[in-house]
Image (cartoon, rainbow, N blue to C red):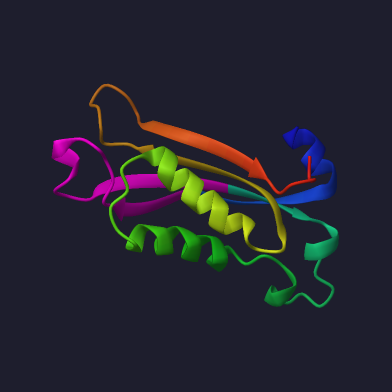
Amino acid sequence: MIDTLLLHCRRLFLRGLTVQAQIGVHDFEQHAPQRIVIDVDLYVSFEGTSPKDDRIDEVVDYDFVRAVVHGRIAKGHIGLQETLCDNILTHLLEHTGVLAARVSTRKPDVYPDCEAVGVEAFRAKPGVL
């Protein structure tokens, strides 16, 4: 599925965007922000994002992705990582240049015996796949 997208799309990505977020459903998660690490892949059409004049307004800007993430975090407490992923995906797909997106979030500080706990979601605009 994603391989087929890559035949017609450019994949933009942000790796390891680290934020402090009010997130979690457990009592101990209600009182202090937690470190969340977010990875994002955006699939954009070659036609719509091939710069002719080497200008930022001809492509999907990475600042847009960061603004979506930071905007959601600024809205306040989130219970579940699934909710965070879904919220970010919805806003990323509102951009006319974005055909599909993948978002993963992970909490690296939850358990001492594993690297992280997390969730990943992928969504495409209707008719893209």
1 above or below 6? above
Residue 117 appears left or right of 47 = left
* Left-right relation of 37 to 98: left
Query: Going 55% across and 50% down the picture, which residue do you hit?
Result: 89
Q: Position of residue 95 (x, y in %)?
A: 65, 63
x, y percentage for residue 25? 25, 38
Quarter of the picture holding the N terminus: top right
Residue 50 in magenta stretch: no
The residue closer to the viewer here, 24 or 13, is: 24
Asked if residue 24 lies left or right of residue 19, the reply is left
Give the number of marks: 0
Residue drawn 85% across the image and 61% down it: 47
Q: Quadrant of the C terminus?
A: top right
The residues colored magenta run 16-40
Q: Position of residue 15 (x, y in %)?
A: 51, 48
The residue sitting at 84% across, 73% down in the picture is: 52
Is residue 36 found inside the magenta-colored segment of the image?
Answer: yes
User: Is residue 98 placed above or below 128 in the rendered structure?
Assistant: below
